[in-house]
Image (cartoon, rainbow, N blue to C red):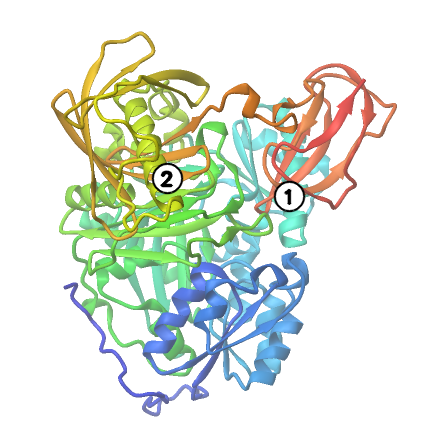
Amino acid sequence: MLHKIQTVASSRRFATTCSNTSQKVAHRQINKLLIANRGEIACRVMRTANRLGIRTVAVFSDADEKSLHVKLANEAYNIGPAASQQSYLRGDKILAVAKKAGCQAIHPGYGFLSENVEFAELCQQEQVTFIGPPASAIRDMGIKSTSKHIMSAAGVPIINGYHGEDQSDEKLMQEAKKIGFPLMIKAVRGGGGKGMRIAETEADFMPMLQSARTESEKAFGDSAMLLERYVRSPRHVEVQVFADHYGNAVYLYERDCSVQRRHQKIIEEAPAPGLSEELRKQLGEAAVRAAKAVNYVGAGTVEFILDKEDLSFHFMEMNTRLQVEHPITEMITGTDLVEWQIKVAAGERLPVTQEDIVKRGHAFEARIYAEDPAGGFLPGAGPLDYLSTPETSNTTRVETGVRQGDEVSIHYDPMIAKLVVWGENRASSLQLLIEQLTNYQIAGLPTNINFLIDLARHEHFQAADVHTGFIEQHTATLFPKKVIPATKVVQIALAHTLNERVQSGASLGAKTCGPFDVEYGFRPNYRVPRSIKIKVGAVEYIVTIETDNDGSYSVRVDDGEWMKVTVRRKPYANRFLLETNIEGHVSCFNAVIAGENISLFDENGMIGGEIVQPRFLVTESSMGGVDASSVTAPMPGVLDKLFVKPGDTVKAGTPVAVLIAMKMEHVLKAAKDGVVKAVPNAEGSNVRKGATLISFE
């Protein structure tokens, strides 16, 4: 059991009981809370609120009516269409719901309105407690140029760059040349990797600047940029801070969030490996100075760039909200940061001093996304046809907002869940992470789970040799050309065969549906070879199966050697759990079968195969290929812009459309010279993956 440094409130309602101080603070009773968010963070806040006896109110868009956070809340209100600009970003609608429902406070979670100055001010005007810092702190830290000046004055190290108000192309190019290349272009109001680009050379600068501006305008309504010296191979280390209304502030140690893709975190750990206790203290004290410099209140994170070579650190930004990765801090300090947020917002003092906060053990968080790592981490969407998660415990947390059968929407971030584990040390925590990742099983849409397993097993990650360019540096070993063992192909074939027997038994009204029930038309002592064509990735295999007299099988793949195989089903809840013995090698796996698609889950993650039907069983419509002379949607999304129309002549590499998917902008280009024949979809249309957007003569 992890050490707890604060007691848990046991009453159905709690009221603030702060002693009188020289600083006058409004004490508010909070017994009803609106969560202005969705997904896993809304569910996370509700868990703590329920434990404290606080009733919760959810808000939801049209797309989220049946979502888990709606089900878990005591009340829920629709606030508009699926697009976040018309729902979750409508502060006026959300505040109206809070007042209608009788809520004393609003918790914004992260993203959406969590760092919106205007919303925080509106809550204050309407006397609804905003569970977050003062609007002034959000404003100062939200504008990166302003934050750099404040941090410098507070004695927090900052990195060289340009943070000025002159945003003309000429001025920015001039400053870029002064800083030198490569350099980082960042949205002044940015976050989550949006509005961020790296210009490697002077020639890259203007295209990268325009792209960052466009993305920033869409995400934050502001196109102002700042420029910074780009530190190659830095570590991203951030410090969790917490402050109350009385000037008390503490740090809860640091997290290493270096391993990222598209400038977004994918795996985090706490504490950061390889730091001396002296350096930890320096980072923590610098973070507290940063918080006090803006009269901060509540939970915040101060992010630093840590030079991998000399371990010098520089202020990057402050996130004035609860971070996605806050659970790993809770795991190593035994705290509930959401409970602290609620109580401090209500007027209570911090429950601890710096001396009371003791770190223990090591924790990892892996973000599970609907995305295609091998395809450039392009986000995905679709139904969660099968979802099985690890069992939770004191050492394993699953933070999620979805259930089996739910759909990952194109309108929001593609994160499915956060898997959080704790161990006595880094090695044991990392081993538990790998084990629990193999127990996180999803079928129906692509995920990054296999990639996370490979990443966690990578020798350099195991050695804590991490930096923000980790994935790019190790692309060859993180994405090797994998050879599918013949035994895996055999297991796919056997899963298909046994599943047919189960289905056959069920269709004939059999009392039992075990995988070894005799199928219709079965004749003993009659060996008939059966051939099954299986496609794994781009490779097709022919698997030949013969049933032997003793109930075992003789199997071979293509023209390979015959293998002696036995297989049995193991009882395990509703899983199709199979154990095979292939030439003396016994292994166990879970099989998920949906039509012709088969997913196997074992200690190496998931492998997917497809039973290839004979050609006469394939419908004509399913055989149609995509026109080679076309631009198609690489993922589901919203067609944001079209740059061409029928009759236009384009050159190879010319941008022809912009697709918005999972809050990211993707510029699509023509693959070769041609004349536009048709543009089937209008701007603003929702398009599926593979949809033809531009076709050519």
Dot 1 amino acid type: Glu
Work out which quarter of the rendered image holds the C terminus and state it.
top right
Q: Quadrant of residue 62?
A: bottom right
Where is 531 relative to 42, above or below?
A: above
Q: Is residue 380 left or right of residue 561?
A: right
For this rendering, which residue is in front, 465 or 673? 673
Can residue 607 be seen here? The reply is yes
Work out which quarter of the rendered image holds the N terminus and state it.
bottom left
Q: How far from the left and from the top, in percent, is residue 361?
A: 16, 53
Numbered tag placed on residue 215 in the rendering: 1
Numbered tag placed on residue 643 in the rendering: none
Q: How far from the left and from the top, in percent, is residue 432?
A: 20, 45
Circle 1 packing at 10 Å, graded few (<14), some (14-19), many (20+), is many
Can residue 258 be seen here? The reply is no
Q: How far from the left and from the top, in percent, is residue 664?
A: 59, 43
Nearer the viewer's eye, disc 1 or disc 2?
2
Q: Is residue 6 left or right of residue 173?
A: left
For this rendering, which residue is in front, 22 or 211? 211
Q: Quadrant of residue 177?
A: top right
Q: Quadrant of residue 680?
A: top right
Q: Residue at x 47, y 40 (%)?
A: 445
Where is 485 relative to 594, above or below?
A: above
Numbered tag placed on residue 504 in the rendering: 2
Residues at marks 1 and 2, CA–CA distance in whole angstroms: 53 Å
Q: How far from the left and from the top, in percent, is residue 295?
A: 45, 70
Dot 2 amino acid type: Ser
Q: Secondary structure at mark 2?
A: helix
Circle 2 packing at 10 Å, graded few (<14), some (14-19), many (20+), is some
Q: Secondary structure at mark 1?
A: helix
For this rendering, which residue is in front, 363 or 40? 40
Point out the residue furthest to the left here. 584
